[in-house]
Image (cartoon, rainbow, N blue to C red):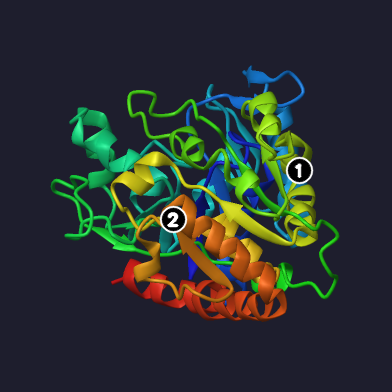
């Protein structure tokens, strides 16, 4: 198939965001599909060097190229700036690709327009990486926003419980189908032992999106703020949050950008870590959305165990060895103790779970089958 794939690498030029798209692109190509990347959000890029949104797309387009080129997509992308100018592949080239494309995939709102060339593609699907927030935004009933989602044939979400009795988030007229972030496990597998004897994670304390929903990660993290004092385990958080507060409670925070600047920096940090300790956004937890982190899937693929807060995902992914869930302080302490007591067994099982549940060769075929139904 010919697949036009849209995402937000230029709008959010960070390592973790880039990897989400890369693993779709590489995974789809490995299955024999012809894939082209498009980004058309109508927004300006975030320029890290200026620490601001910029009407000049140079930083974002350079970032897209540098992220995609090592994987053979250096000439297979186009970025549409807020002013309608095309960078990378031209508008004519994108229209030519779309003319006989079979499938349009929009991940995380990489495109917010229904240009004629996109609308004519026979099958169109949206992948929601931010469940709860997306559904609540739709429920507001803003006409253009609701109509945008009506143009898709299928809506997928990383929230496995969205639209089920386990989760009370309103879905209205829309049906959401479960999918997971695919991981090209061969790109994460490593035989090199962890160089950090630390439980780590990469996290955003609060986001600028959906400011009317008080569902950010800070609300949940504060519940576990005193965890380092309850365990001999050590932590290192790559976080854009309150460094002094976290340091005072034993978390050893570092600036998130130091490990998120590029895909390589992001992967190096995860592969050098002992394991992940992860807290989820309050919205995911309070609604039991079933969301599972693409970042955690990468830890598992690298053979690094993970202890992560349960959002309802434990009903869908094996939990207990290699991947552990927690909801309370006591469960977090117990999980850390288990991981420390038999780390090798947990590390082996982590790799198995990644292969069984998240490998692109397992995730993408059923996704494509449903997308094209």
Q: Does 196 sit left or right of 22 as displayed?
A: right
| Residue depicted at x 41% and y 45% | 130
Q: Does 171 sit left or right of 23 as displayed?
A: left
Instruction: Give the quarter of the image for residue 53.
Output: top right
Residue 354 in the image, given as x and y percentages of width and height: 58, 74
| Residue depicted at x 23% and y 54% | 167
Label 1 residue SS: helix
| Residue depicted at x 41% and y 61% | 103
Quadrant for the C terminus in the image:
bottom left
Q: Is residue 183 above or below residue 288?
A: below
Q: Does 167 sit left or right of 321 as displayed?
A: left
Marks 2 and 1 in Cβ contact (< 8 Å):
no
Residue 30 in the image, given as x and y percentages of width and height: 62, 75
Residue 248 in the image, given as x and y percentages of width and height: 69, 30
Q: Is 166 or 252 nearer to us in this picture?
A: 252
Observer-side mark, 2 or 1, equals: 1
Q: Give whichever of discs 2 and 1 has the lower sequence position.
A: 2
Q: Is 262 or 338 nearer to us in this picture?
A: 338
Q: Report crowding for label 2: few under 14, some 14 to 19, many 20 or more residues within 10 A (C-alpha).
A: many
Label 2 residue SS: strand
Residue 197 in the image, given as x and y percentages of width and height: 80, 58
Q: Does 93 sit left or right of 304 as displayed?
A: left
Say which residue label 1 marks. Answer: 259
* Residue 35 at least partly seen: no
Say which residue label 2 marks. Answer: 105
* Residue 130 at least partly seen: yes
Q: Is residue 153 above or below residue 372?
A: above
Instruction: Give the quarter of the image for residue 249.
Output: top right
Q: Is 118 or 294 nearer to us in this picture?
A: 294
């Amino acid at each position: 198939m010919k697949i036009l794939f849209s995402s937000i690498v230029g709008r959010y030029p960070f390592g973790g965001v880039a990897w989400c798209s890369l693993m779709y692109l590489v995974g789809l190509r490995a299955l024999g599909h012809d894939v082209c990347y498009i980004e058309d959000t109508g927004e300006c890029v975030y320029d890290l060097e200026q620490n601001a949104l910029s009407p000049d797309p140079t930083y974002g387009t350079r970032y897209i190229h540098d992220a995609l080129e090592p994987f053979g997509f250096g000439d297979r992308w186009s970025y549409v700036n807020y002013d309608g100018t095309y960078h990378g592949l031209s508008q004519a080239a994108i229209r030519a690709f779309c003319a006989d494309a079979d499938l349009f995939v929009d991940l995380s709102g990489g495109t917010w327009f229904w240009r004629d060339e996109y609308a004519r593609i026979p099958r169109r699907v949206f992948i929601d990486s931010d469940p709860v927030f997306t559904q609540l935004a739709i429920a507001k009933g803003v006409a253009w926003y609701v109509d945008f989602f009506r143009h898709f044939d299928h809506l997928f979400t990383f929230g496995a419980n969205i639209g089920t009795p386990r989760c009370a988030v309103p879905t209205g007229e829309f049906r959401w189908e479960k999918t997971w972030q695919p991981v090209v496990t061969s790109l994460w597998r490593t035989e090199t032992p962890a160089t950090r004897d630390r439980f780590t994670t990469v996290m955003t304390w609060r986001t600028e999106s959906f400011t009317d929903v008080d569902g950010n990660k800070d609300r949940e993290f504060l519940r576990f703020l005193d965890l380092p004092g309850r365990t001999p385990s050590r932590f290192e958080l790559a976080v854009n949050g309150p460094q002094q507060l976290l340091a005072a409670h034993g978390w050893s925070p570092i600036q998130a950008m130091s490990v998120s600047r590029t895909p390589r920096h992001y992967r190096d940090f995860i592969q050098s870590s002992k394991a992940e300790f992860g807290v989820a956004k309050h919205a995911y937890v309070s609604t039991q959305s079933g969301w599972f982190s693409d970042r955690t899937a990468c830890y598992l693929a690298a053979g690094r165990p993970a202890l992560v807060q349960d959002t309802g995902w434990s009903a869908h992914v094996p939990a207990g060895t290699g991947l552990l869930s927690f909801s309370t302080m006591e469960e977090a302490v117990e999980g850390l103790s288990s991981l420390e007591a038999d780390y090798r067994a947990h590390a082996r099982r982590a790799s198995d779970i990644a292969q069984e549940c998240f490998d692109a060769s397992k995730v993408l075929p059923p996704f494509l089958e449903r997308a094209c139904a």
